Image (cartoon, rainbow, N blue to C red):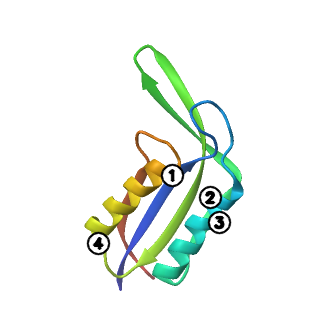
Amino acid sequence: MTRYLIQILLPLSDNDGQPFAQTEYARVRDELTGRFGGMTAFTRGPAEGFWKEKADTVRDDIVVFEVMGPDLDPGWWGRYRRTLEERFRQESIVVRAQEIRLL
């Protein structure tokens, strides 16, 4: 059975280092659970993201939210990503999908 695994990488703090309220993550959890019937959040130990900006290496602590579903609606996911970018005050939030097979 083919399904899609969609992951959202969310920052723990804004660009000034101010942590986001836990209610923001609860809101995402509730939205995803309501739409997809369930979700998984990896929040215990933040992952570290690194990328280059000019000559500097930038670091961000992130949490990963993921859902599984039989379909992939790129239009809906694009709109939701833009909503999250506004809500979390980010230039870009990574939302990635991969086709998976349940064994």
Q: Which mark is residue 73?
A: 4
Tell which of 11 and 19 is nearer to you: 19
Quarter of the image where one finds residue 16:
top right
Quarter of the figure with the C terminus: bottom left
Residue found at the far top of this picture: 55
Residue tagged 3: 26
Bin the neighbour count of mark 4 within 10 Å (Cα to Cα): few under 14, some 14-19, many 20 and up. few
Q: Nearer the viewer, mark 3 or mark 4?
A: 3
Disc ID at residue 87 = 1
> Which three-letter amino acid code belongs to the residue tagged 1?
Arg
Mark before the other along the chain sequence, 4 or 1? 4
Instruction: Measure how far apart labels 1 and 2 are at the Cα level.
Output: 8 Å
Q: CA distance from mark 4 to mark 1?
A: 21 Å
The answer to whether the residues at label 2 and label 3 have Cβ atoms under 8 Å apart is: yes
- Residue at screen point 35% across, 82% down: 70
What amino acid is at disc 2?
Glu
